[in-house]
Amino acid sequence: MKTERDLIDKLNKEKNLTDMEFHALITDTHKQTTDYITALANSIRKEIFGNHIYIRGLIEVSNYCKKDCYYCGIRCSNTAVSRYRLSAGDILERCALGYNLGFRTFVLQGGEDAEFDDDTLCHLIHSIKEKYSDCAVTLSLGERSKDSYRKLFNAGADRYLLRHETADREHYGMLHPSFQSFDKRMHCLYTLKELGFQTGCGLMVGTPGQTPEMLVKDLRFIRKFNPEMVGIGPFLPASNTPFSNMTAGSVEMTLRLLSIVRIMLPEVLLPATTALCISNKSDYTRGIFAGSNVIMPNLTPTDARKKYLLYNGKAGIKDTTEDLLTSLKDNLNTIGCKVTVDRGDYRKRENNV
Ligand code: SAH
Ligand code: SF4
């Protein structure tokens, strides 16, 4: 009979486990298991990235969305949302501020807003790249056609975040209306990778109906897809959505998955997400201890930020980006880490197994 330590050591050595072993690791809540896996994931993070934490300036460009994901506060059916869209000028202004603060990656995230068509986005990406040639542009704008993704890549976008949300087809059907397709989402991810984007998949932990077996499927998919980035955060209920009364996902389970992913894919770019900070706004440090190496402070203008509510209780709505960064630097300092002024691209180590 394998102990949990044996399992964690096996994961570290072989970068893989059987489904039953993944299941055992996910469901074991003993403190000694948590301590052991956390220490290992944290030491791998340090080995790969030293004490450097990459920061990304998150610009929430629009809360218009044509999709209707049941969990999301800005889904198109939510008529209580006051909708906004940033102009190219607004976005460039935030990049200027972000650049001065040391950001070298800008993440343009938003709902699926038809006004952000290919021409508009390509123009915007060109402008950002022209002014800040030493910066990376990450997009997180949902599902688009291959042709569109290609144009955005050719315009200079470097990375694309598109969480798969769940690797279980039936579960996907429980979280989304029937016009949204599991196959299409997965297809988009493979297309992004094929086009050359540093690609991020990911999931919410504790969405309604999620089981440990489904999480095993997520880990299996993440391993197979071998993404450059993985976004994992707890599901948090959002008002005026079908899931508004559902229970929030577990922060502990989120941390466990972060650690497993860090051990399985040592070089992966792994953000400690804002959703992790639901009960304490500096809880991203718990993500770092679990193996995360990326933080995405909010660079959206504050009046827009409070309208981009994917879930209730979003952290850092009121603080200026300057304040967010100052407290981030202080908090990282106390745990022996520091913010790095660097694009923070994905790098594969030569000698890695
Ligand atoms: N529209 C794009 C990007 C914005 S949404 C897209 O969907 O890909 C970014 C992520 O926020 C989603 O992938 C989802 O995983 C997360 N999200 C949405 N609603 C959430 C909620 N209620 N709790 C936690 N995360 C949520
Ligand atoms: Fe739109 Fe993304 Fe929210 Fe789904 S999760 S409704 S695609 S913003």
Image (cartoon, rainbow, N blue to C red):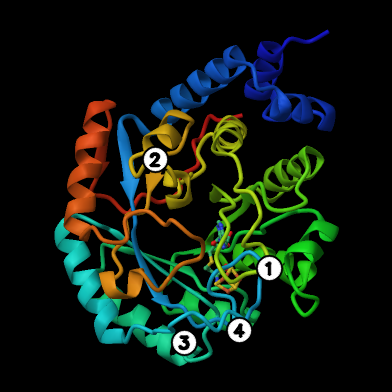
Which residue type does callout 1 highlight?
Pro
Disc 4 residue crowd, few under 14, some 14–19, many 20+, Cα 10 Å = some
Q: Which mark is residue 242?
A: 1
* Rendered position, 198 above or below 220: below
Q: Is residue 75 left or right of residue 155?
A: right
Residue drawn at point x = 31 percent, y = 85 percent: 88
Query: Any atom of ligand 2 within 8 Å of the CB at mark 4?
Result: yes
Q: How far is disc 1 from disc 3 in space, using C-alphas?
A: 27 Å
Of the numbered discs 1 and 2, the one sitting upstream in the chain is 1
Residue drawn at point x = 55 percent, y = 66 percent: 239
Of the numbered discs 3 and 2, the one sitting upstream in the chain is 3
Residue at mark 3 = 116
- Percent of width and height locating residue 266: 53, 34
Disc 1 residue crowd, few under 14, some 14–19, many 20+, Cα 10 Å = some
Of the numbered discs 1 and 3, the one sitting upstream in the chain is 3
- Secondary structure under tag 1 reads loop
